[in-house]
Amino acid sequence: MAYSEKLLDHFKNPRNVGTLDKGDKNVGTGLVGAPECGDVMRLQIEVNDEDGTIKDAKFKTFGCGSAIASSSLATEWLKGKSINEALSIDNMEIVEELALPPVKIHCSVLAEDAIKAAIKDYQEKNGLEVSPETENSHH
Amino acid sequence: MTNKRLIYLDNNATTPCDPRVVDAMVPYFYEVPGNAASRNHPFGWAAEEAVDYARDQIADLINVDPKEIIFTSGATEADNLALKGVYEMYSRKGNHIITVKTEHKAVLDACQKIEKMGGQVTYLDVDDKGLINLEELEAAITDKTILISVMWANNETGVIQPMKAIGEICEKHGVLFFSDAVQAVGKIPVDPKETGVHLMAFTAHKMYGPKGVGALFVNRKKPRVKVTAQVDGGGHERGMRSGTLNVPGIVGFGKAAELAKKEMAQDAARLSKLRDKLEKELSANLEEVYINGSVENRMPHVANVSFKHVEGEGLMMTFNQEIAVSSGSACTSASLEPSYVLVALGLGDDLAHSSIRFSLGRFTKEEDVDYTIAELTKGVTHMRNLSPIWEMYKEGVDIDAIEWGSEH
């Protein structure tokens, strides 16, 4: 099974690896997956106070190459988006962009879940109404 | 494939064919094309002679009578023939088989089929070194027990079971002893008769021979063991396995056995040094490196290593354009379950997902191992820099105390 160039690039040169301050109220953190399942994704967003757009996104992922590339790609896509735009990111877009094989689709699902979990965390922290999409988990 | 340097450290999956084996096989595709069962012309005689010679070479490697070698298509077929063949042949004596949770799937799946056919199977646990408990084995024997099936050396960890002691228990209770010895034959001295093994499966392609040919050793005297054929046809192989013999494959198998007998000791000595170097240097370069399985009782060329908080398949992707190894990580299988062998050793799922199996071989060079050490060190560091659980671990967070929500 050969991986796509894009996937390999995101895996070897992952974008936006790192950690944002969890305590910052503008930061939302999503931690999904479980070590015993072989996948843990932590995705964080930092939202701009003034216009409500995502000004920064960071991730760290324990998992296979597809999981790492999916989360790297997700952070790239998140930057500059509004919360609503971010909520509309669908896992199948990640599948297409990285040409994930069928056995790796769950990695893209995990990335979508991580985005939603991060948004939910941000909304809860700031006393905002939690978007119903974030409850729409795949599990 | 590219012109990049490629390193093969997956010899437990299959070994390259030794060029000397290939040379021995070539004439039997065209120049000597006969069917070994054609008894009435020179083509058949020449093929039969070649098969007889190979049978002698193989019997000589494991110190048995050539008449005790039944050729098959490989070890999976030999495993099936031994287990199902004994189950059917000895059904009047009993229906109980004892095996081990860390056996190869060819044994475990055949045992499951036997359970569906009405048999009873006990699956023994192993300890944290991968070894069975002899008292548990003895206690599991009943008056219905007809067969004990224990693999000689494990494919994932290289752990060698206490074969001689198991043989003594079988002898004491009058139970047949079968071993899947695929990973051991040709790599370490294997003598089934001296060990009390009555049936033994092995294959050419794990000992520098060709794929598609294996054998079942079936003891002929004291006790005379019989198995019910699982493939019916022309009554080849003393009626135990019908089908035209794979003459070139068998010739290659024979040559591989002859070479193994000559070179096994020097290969093992050289490879165990390289293996030890690999383990030692990885453990020195990196934190939280765990060697899986018994270090005292294992094959000389195998290292099964877990790198904590690094997912095995992801790690493999950092170097798998150049280095071939295998992983117990779930991601390498469709099932999303980590290696059942490592789980049976009591490894947590996290360490099982983090495992890499290195299996060295006759054609592994020291520079290959040096390059692998360097690439693995880089790869593990890359993956740990990316790993949220490594970060938590370094911050002193108790990872087991976190409630992980996902069902993935």
Image (spheres, coloured by chain):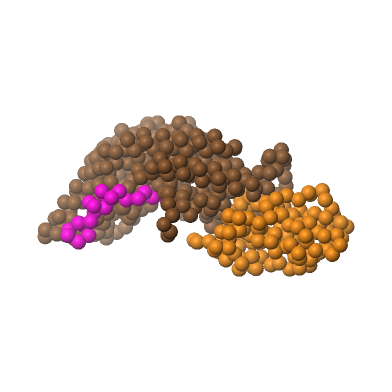
Q: Residue at x 58, y 59 (%)?
A: A9
The percent position of residue A132, horizontal first and vertical second, equals 80, 65
Q: Where is residue B393 in the image (x, y as percent from the top left)?
A: 68, 40
Residue pushed farthest left?
B41
Q: Where is residue B254 in the image (x, y as percent from the top left)?
A: 25, 47
Magenta-colored stretch includes residue B28: yes
Spot the brown chain and give its letter.
B
Residue at the limit of the structure toward the right, as seen here: A127
- Give the quadrant of residue A97: bottom right
Left or right: residue B26 compared with residue A45: left
Residue located at (16% from left, 51% from top): B49
Q: Which residue is drawn at 50% across and 61% down?
A: A2
Q: Chain A is drawn in which colour?
A: orange
Q: What range is drawn magenta here?
A: B13-32
Which residue occupies the foreground of this view, A99 or B353? A99
Split into 4 quadrants, where in the image is the C terminus of chain B?
bottom right
